[in-house]
Amino acid sequence: MNRHVFVLCATLLMLLSACGNGDAERRRGDSPQPGTCEPACETGFSCVNSECYVQVRPEDCGEDEEFDPRLRVCLTPQCDDGVQNGEEEGVDCGGDCEACEIPELCGNGEIDEGEACDHGGTIQLACAYGESSCEVCNVRCELVPGQVTGFCGDDQVQAGGGEECDHGGSPQTACPDGEDVCQVCAEDCTLVAGEASGSCGDGVIQGEEECDGAALGGASCQSLDLPEGELSCAANCTYDTAACVASDGIEELALGYSHTCARRADGSVYCWGRNDDGRLGDGGSSDRVTPTAVVGLDDAVQISAGGYHTCAIRENGTVVCWGDNADGQLGNGTGVGSRLPTPVPGLTNVTAITTGTWHTCAVTGRGAAYCWGQNNYGQLGDGRAVGSSSPVLVSIGLSDATRIDAANFHTCARRNNGALVCWGRNTYGELGDPNFTLSYSEEALVQVRGPNGTATLSGDFIGLGNGFTCARTDQGQVYCWGINGEGQLGTGVAGTSYYAGLVGTGFAQLSVGEFHACARDSAGAVSCWGRGSEGRLGLGNIANYDQPQTLVMPAVEHVEAGGTHTCAILQDGRVMCWGRNSNGQLGDGTLNDRLVPTEVGF
C-alpha cells in the first residue's frame, strides 16, 4: 500500500470526536503554538508537521497507532508527511507519494551532487534492528525519518535480527499449565528450556508474585496495615484486600481516567484500576481489579482522582497526594512520582481539593485557593504561564472560594456569594463568558455568564470536562457550555457554544467527566449525556446522546463521572460502576467493559 503516513490522531481537541476511540489515557493536548514550532515547542511537547503536540508514553497509543520514541507522540502510518514508511512503494515528499521528481542519478549507488545518500536501487525504509530512531534513504536520495521497526519485545519475530520468538515485553518464564517439558521465550527473544513450574496458579509464590492460591507468605489484613478481615489471593497472584474492610459504608467516590477511589466513613481509602504510576497508593505498580486499601491513610475527609494521580485531605486539614508527578502535580516540590501518599508541604486548613489531568488545586478555610502542576494556559491562576511543583496562591482576584474544580487546561471556582469564576484555556469558550474572546486567561478571573451572555451565573456546583464546563444552580437547573462534538453539552443543539445552555431542571446533583456528564434527581434517578463509547453512559449501548438519558438502575445517592467510566453510590450503600474496564477500574473483578451498571466487588 502507498497510503500510510505518520499523522497525529488528534491535531486539536475539536477533532477528538472523530479520531481513534477517544481514550483519555493518550494524554492528547492541542498545540500551544498552533501552526508553528518557532522558536521552539514548550517542554513536554514535540514538533510534528510544524505544530507542537503533547508528548505521551508507548502505552498511551491505540491499536492503530505507533509510538515514535524520537518524538514521543502517537502516530498513525499514512502517506503525505515526508516519512518513508515500510509499505510505501513510491516516495513520500509531503504530498502525493508518487508525484515526486526522482533525480536521474539517484539509485546508481554513488552519492552525486545534490544527493544526501544513494540507496543503490533498494530503498532503505526501516531503522536497523534494535534502533529506536534513525534517518533512512528514500527514492529521491534524501535522508528522511525512518520507520521504527524490529526490536525484541514488539510481539513480532524478526529472524533477521536473530529472534527466535518475541515475548511482547514480558519474557515467558514457565511452561503453560499441564506441560512438563517446553521451550519458553527468554528476555533476549531466544528459545530456552522452560521450567515445569513457576506459573501463577501453581500454589507457590515466586518471582514478583505477592501470593499464589492459598499461599499468602504469612501476610494478613493486619500485617498490611488494613482493617480487620480475611486476606485472599486474586487470580493474578496479587493480594485481594476486598474483605479487609471496616463495617461502615462508602461516603465518597473519586474517578480518574482509568482508576477509581472510594472513601469510607472511618477515613480509610480504597482504590482500584490502573496503577503503573502508583496512582492507587498501595505501594505497588500492579493494576487492581477489586478495591485495594491506600497504605497509611486512615483519616481522609475528602478525596479527588485526577488523570494520573490522586489526592486526599486529612482530618487535620493537610493534603497528601500520590501517583504520577511528571508535571509537579503532587505538589511536593519535585518531579518524582510516589506510590504512597506524600504530604504537600505548606498547606494547612484545607477544606476542598481537586485534581485535574496535570494540575491540582485546593481551597483553605479562609477562602484562599492554591494550585500546582502544569500551567501552560495559566490554569494555576498565579498570573503566569509557568508550571510549579509546589503550591502557588491563586492571586488573580480570588480570596473567597468555597469549592474548586480542575480539568485538563482550565480551572473554575465557586465564590462565597455563589458566583462562578474560571481561568486558564478558553479555546472553546469553556471559561463561560461569550464576551471574553481570548484563547486563554492567565492574569484575570473570567466571570461565568448566564444564557443571555450578560447576567452572571451563580450556583452551588461547577464541574469541568475536556474543553467544556457545566454548572448546577441552587434551583436545580443544569447549564453547560464549550465544545460539543459528542453531545457533551446536553442541550440537544449541535456545535460549540460560547453561551451557557440549559440542559434540564430538577437535578439535585451533577458530575462532569472528560467527554460526558451525569446528574441525579431528588428521587435518585440518574441521567447521563455526551460520549457513549465503552458504555460510559450506562444505557446498554455505545451511542452518543446530546440530551439527558435516564438509566435503568436502583436509586442512587451520588453519581460520579470519570474519564471513560462512571460510578454511583446507591441509596442502599452499594457501589455500581459502568463503562471502560481495561485496567479493572470498574472494580468488579474483571477486565470487561460494562454497558450497564455493575456492582463493585467490595
Image (spheres, rainbow, N blue to C red):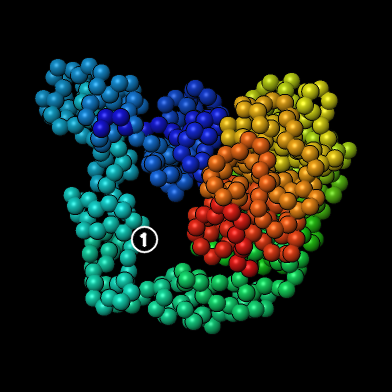
* Residue 439 seen from this side: yes
Residue 459 position within the rendered picture, expressed as x and y whole percent measured from the top left = 82, 38
The residue depicted at 47 percent of the width and 79 percent of the height is 213
* Mark 1: amino acid: Ser
Q: Residue at x 73, y 67 (%)?
A: 249
Relative height, residue 177 to residue 147 (above, below): below
Query: Circle 1 is placed at which residue position?
Result: 170
Q: Is residue 455 left or right of residue 502?
A: right
Q: Quadrant of residue 548?
A: top right
Residue drawn at 78 percent across, 34 percent down: 421
Name the outermost residue toward the right: 417
| Image coordinates for residue 86, horizontal then vertical, percent | 26, 36
Of residues 420 and 533, the one nearer the viewer is 533
* Secondary element at tag 1: loop
Q: Quadrant of the C terminus?
A: bottom right
| Residue 65 or residue 369, whichever sits in front | 65
In the rendering, at what x and y percent does residue 298 appear? Answer: 72, 67
Residue 540, how many percent across, how many down?
A: 56, 50
Q: Is residue 490 above or below residue 181?
A: above
Taking depth in this image into account, of 400 and 232 the one nearest to the observer is 232
- Please say if 360 is above or below 29: below
Residue 338 in view, yes or no? no
